[in-house]
């Protein structure tokens, strides 16, 4: 999973969010199917390792493609809502595992569940922000027109999206008289002029890049002081959050009671975290992150000294805290380096 994040992050930036998302889904389907046909320990280990690598591509690409389809006012809540589907998957897995006790059959059905999602690639559009960052303004405009159609809206005729390269060469003296909408970005240096309506057209937030900068997005964030600190901090906090989240899942066998019921209860414990984190755009990212990590840490400490059914209670509290911190971090990390 540690390798899957950077790998699918690269694929997402290089070849598109949609490509990264559905290549991960396809790879998960194949590896789960091959896992069900494993012939020895090492074949099982290899297929599970590749599957874990692909699993990490889902949150990387899904959060990027969903948050880039909405404005800044809704970006946090949409990112959280996207990650909330993870809880539904956990609950469904607990029920499926309870009904299908053979591990080979369970892997096969998990592969089938993933494969069912593949046809949705025909419905999910590529991120228009990513298309624009790659100089594909015409395709980006087509996506926006398609979105507007399904929302009973229209994109004004005569409006064009200008690619980053073309925008650098264009001299627009009065943006309100121009029929071109220049959108330009650079995470390292951003100067913005606010949107302003003009008749049937709107000149959007304009992001002017430092010309000639061709560094990868991650390197740009590290070179820039503020976002560099945010990148390092989010990496550290993500390690702590996932250690709590997956550590509690791995410890299920040591908890009292039925393991299937315990897994289901720990999944249900994450639901309040979704409700809380939906206020991310009102209370901010840092407060939710600190509260989540603190809750997870305190609950895990009590897990070590509690006994009986109280262990499950405190484990649920730890899962709640980690589940609140994890999606918050993903949204925050996605905002550290902007596409547009």
Image (cartoon, rainbow, N blue to C red):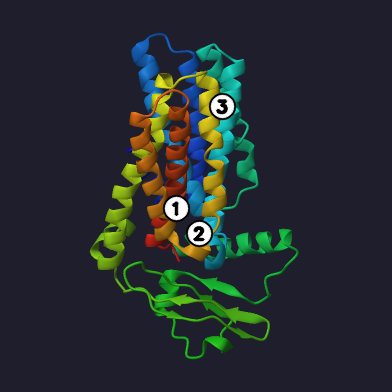
Q: In this view, does 175 lie above or below 64?
A: below
Looking at the picture, how far across and down is residue 105, in whole percent?
56, 14
Instruction: Tell me, yes or no, whether the two marked residues, 2 and 1, touch with CB atoms within 8 Å.
Output: yes
Residue that badge 1 annotates = 328
Q: Earlier in the sequence, mark 3 or mark 2?
A: 3
**Circle 3: is it few (<14), some (14-19), or many (20+) Cα within 10 Å?**
some
**Which residue is at the front of the view, 205 or 237?**
237
Report helix, strand or loop for mark 1.
helix
Q: Mark 3 points at which residue?
A: 93
From what the image shows, is residue 211 above or below residue 230?
below
Q: Residue furthest right?
A: 152
Query: Is residue 14 something that shows in the picture?
Result: yes
Q: Position of residue 321 (x, y in %)?
A: 44, 44
Q: For the residues marked 3 and 2, what is the alpha-carbon distance in whole angstroms?
A: 28 Å
Q: Is the residue marked by circle 1 packed among few (<14), some (14-19), or many (20+) residues within 10 Å? A: many
Indicate which disc, 3 or 1, sits on the residue closer to the N terminus.
3
């Amino acid at each position: 999973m540690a390798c899957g994040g950077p790998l699918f992050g690269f694929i997402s930036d290089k070849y598109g969010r949609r490509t990264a998302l559905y290549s991960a889904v396809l790879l998960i389907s194949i590896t789960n199917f091959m896992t069900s046909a494993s012939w020895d320990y090492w074949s099982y280990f290899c297929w599970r390792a590749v599957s874990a690598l692909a699993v990490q591509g889902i949150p990387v690409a899904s959060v990027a493609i969903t948050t880039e389809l909405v404005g800044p006012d809704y970006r946090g809540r949409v990112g959280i809502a996207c990650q909330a589907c993870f809880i539904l998957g956990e609950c469904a897995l607990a029920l499926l595992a309870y009904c299908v006790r053979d591990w080979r059959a369970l892997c096969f059905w998990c592969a089938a569940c993933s494969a069912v999602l593949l046809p949705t690639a025909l419905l999910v559009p590529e991120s228009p922000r990513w298309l624009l960052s790659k100089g594909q303004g015409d395709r980006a405009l087509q996506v926006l027109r398609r979105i507007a159609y399904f929302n009973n809206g229209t994109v004004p005729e005569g409006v064009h999206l200008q690619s980053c390269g073309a925008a650098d060469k264009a001299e627009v003296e009065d943006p309100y008289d121009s029929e071109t909408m220049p959108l330009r970005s650079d995470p390292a240096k951003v100067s913005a002029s606010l949107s302003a309506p003009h008749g049937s057209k709107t000149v959007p937030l304009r992001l002017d890049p430092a010309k000639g900068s061709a560094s990868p997005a991650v390197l740009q964030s590290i070179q820039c002081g503020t976002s560099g600190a945010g990148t390092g901090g989010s990496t550290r906090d993500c390690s702590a959050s996932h250690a709590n989240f997956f550590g509690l899942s791995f410890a299920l066998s040591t908890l009292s009671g039925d393991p299937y019921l315990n897994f289901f209860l720990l999944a249900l414990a994450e639901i309040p975290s979704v409700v809380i984190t939906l206020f991310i755009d009102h209370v901010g990212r840092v407060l939710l992150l600190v509260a989540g990590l603190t809750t997870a840490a305190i609950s895990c400490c009590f897990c070590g000294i509690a006994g009986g059914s109280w262990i499950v209670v405190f484990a649920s509290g730890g899962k709640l805290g980690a589940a609140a911190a994890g999606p918050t971090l993903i949204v925050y990390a996605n905002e550290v380096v902007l596409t547009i």
